[in-house]
Image (spheres, grey):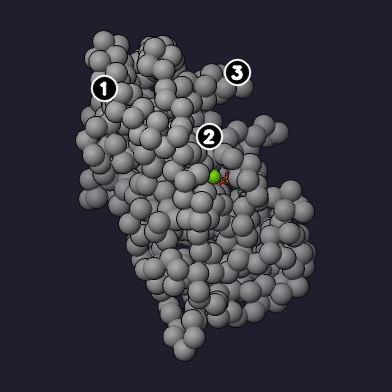
């Protein structure tokens, strides 16, 4: 396998975790480059379900090096608990997990500010995961963040934390939220820092050593293209560059070492949180929820569901430079007699073949649909392209024509073996 960036081509939860796990078989190194524990990547191995938040999904395959890159924001207590949870499930992490020393740390005031801001903007809520992601990236950009290199040096951390808590408590008090106790936060974070210290290293140098040895690196995207801080449906986005460009800045691996980009998309659309979703369809959502599907892996919230949006994914193919698409959850459409696909948007007399920049304008758009006949049979047993129903293949071929990239992988269930390589 070549050096591969894997990105979500929609609004997150496309099934990246499952596809990462499958592709890790051919990789040597798996690296997360953006986001934090707002992500929830589900991987099934046999009867066991793993939900990874910060640890790369490659960790479930032995002897693969897993790296949390500099572009990620790390909640140290959350990461410690995630590692402990994996150990309890028998997953070995000690020799193959490495954490960037320059990744920024998520602190309790980030979470408090995230929650308080959402409460204050009653009518403009983003519906965040309340993990403090936005405020942590804001501090990084404002150059007042603390990094892993600070966390693992107890005295330096204590000093810097004191100043930061003092300043943030002023804001919390002004917003009517409870101020934080410095000694309590210090204790919890020093414990987590001591636990994580053996994993912390210069991951840029580590990744370049891997490149020199000719090893294959898989870049694990989090969130999705339309949650990207620059390219998403702003302000209903997350606070990092989730798209393929973020893989270089978020790891220190340059663009000329990237060989291909895989875009992951569902055969339909989902979104969790607020913000425009042009193809949202409540009946489709009810159907998927009744099958026990489409509940958030991090917050448990029911995901909003809609038809496949070819306008959005076409744009995602361009922004990320997608070479190959992986389609997941094809089996979610198995029972439908008619399947809609959005070809363009319309608002009044205006027709759009791209997402308008203004979220309110996008929210006012109506989808222009094409209809496809459903296959009305289970696909979950298919293991080869030719075993898929003719109508399912026609649907997938139409999608690749509409979005401008070939489909190389089709997933028909959460399990590893429910994966078709075309
Ligand atoms: P991620 O955040 O992109 O990794 O996606 P999530 O794990 O949050 O959500 C994807 C969900 O779809 C998870 O519950 C997966 O187990 C599940 N999944 C992935 N691919 C398939 C598929 O082809 N069929 C079915 N039925 N479930 C799938
Ligand atoms: P994975 O990696 C789906 C959404 C939140 C909210 C917005 C901002 O599992 O695909 P944040 O907490 O980041 O400030 O929230 O982004 N969001 C996700 N939606 N999948 C994710 O990650 C998400 N991470 C954040 O629901 O709408
Ligand atoms: Mg998810």
Secondary structure beneath dot 3 equals helix
- The residue closer to the viewer here, 171 or 404, is 171
The answer to which image quadrant residue 337 occupies is bottom right
Residue 138, position as x, y percentages in the image: 31, 41
The answer to which image quadrant residue 269 occupies is bottom right
Q: Earlier in the sequence, mark 1 or mark 2?
A: 2
Residue 210: mark in rendering: none
220 vs 124: above or below: above
Q: Residue at x 50, y 76 (%)?
A: 365
Q: Pointer 3: residues within 10 angstroms few (<14), some, or many (20+)?
A: few
Q: Earlier in the sequence, mark 3 or mark 1?
A: 3
Q: Earlier in the sequence, mark 2 or mark 3?
A: 2
Secondary structure beneath dot 2 equals strand
Q: Pointer 1: residues within 10 angstroms few (<14), some, or many (20+)?
A: few
Alpha carbons under labels 3 and 1: distance apart: 37 Å
345 vs 110: above or below: below
Numbered marks: total? 3
Q: Residue at x 65, y 34 (%)?
A: 49
Alpha carbons under labels 2 and 3: distance apart: 14 Å
Tell me the quadrant of the picture where the N terminus can be found. top left
Disc 2: which residue: 52
Disc 2 beta carbon < 8 A from ligand 1?
Answer: no
Disc 3: which residue: 88
Disc 1: which residue: 163
Residue 87, position as x, y percentages in the image: 55, 19
- 135 sits left or right of 378 in the view: left
Disc 1 beta carbon < 8 A from ligand 2?
Answer: no
Secondary structure beneath dot 1 equals helix
């Amino acid at each position: 396998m070549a050096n591969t960036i894997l990105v979500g081509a929609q609004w997150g939860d496309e099934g990246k975790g499952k596809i990462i796990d499958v592709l890790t078989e051919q990789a040597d190194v798996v690296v997360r480059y953006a986001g934090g524990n707002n992500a929830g990547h589900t991987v099934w191995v046999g009867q066991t379900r793993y939900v990874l938040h910060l640890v790369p999904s490659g960790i479930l395959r032995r002897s693969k090096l897993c790296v949390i890159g500099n572009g990620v924001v790390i909640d140290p207590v959350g990461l410690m608990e995630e590692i402990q949870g994996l150990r309890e499930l028998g997953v070995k992490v000690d020799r193959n997990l490495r954490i960037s020393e320059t990744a920024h740390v998520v602190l309790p005031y980030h979470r408090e500010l995230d929650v308080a801001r959402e409460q204050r903007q009653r009518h403009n809520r983003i519906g965040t995961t309340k993990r403090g992601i936005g405020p942590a990236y804001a501090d990084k950009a404002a150059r007042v963040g603390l990094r892993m290199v600070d966390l693992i040096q107890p005295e330096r951390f204590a000093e810097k934390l004191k100043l930061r808590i003092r300043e943030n408590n002023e804001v919390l008090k002004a917003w009517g939220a409870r101020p934080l106790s410095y000694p309590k936060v210090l204790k919890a974070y020093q414990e987590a820092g001591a636990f994580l210290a053996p994993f912390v290293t210069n991951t840029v140098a580590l990744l370049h050593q891997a490149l020199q040895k000719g090893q294959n690196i898989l870049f694990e995207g989090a969130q999705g293209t339309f949650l990207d801080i620059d390219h998403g449906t702003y302000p209903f986005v997350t606070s990092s560059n989730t798209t393929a460009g973020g893989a270089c800045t978020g790891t220190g691996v340059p663009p000329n070492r990237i060989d291909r980009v895989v875009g992951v998309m569902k055969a339909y659309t989902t979104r969790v949180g607020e913000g425009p979703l042009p193809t949202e369809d409540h009946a489709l959502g009810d159907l998927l929820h009744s099958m026990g599907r489409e509940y958030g892996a991090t917050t448990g919230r029911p995901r909003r569901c809609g038809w496949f949006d070819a306008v959005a994914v076409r744009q995602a193919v361009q922004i990320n430079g997608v070479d190959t698409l992986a389609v997941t959850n094809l089996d979610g459409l198995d029972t439908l007699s008619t399947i809609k696909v959005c070809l363009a948007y319309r608002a009044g007399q205006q027709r759009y073949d791209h997402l308008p920049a203004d979220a309110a304008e996008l929210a006012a758009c109506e989808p222009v649909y094409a209809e496809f006949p459903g296959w009305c049979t289970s696909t979950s047993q298919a293991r080869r392209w030719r075993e898929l129903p003719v109508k399912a293949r026609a649907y997938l071929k139409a999608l690749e024509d509409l979005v401008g990239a070939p489909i190389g992988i089709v997933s028909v269930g959460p399990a590893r073996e429910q994966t078709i390589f075309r």
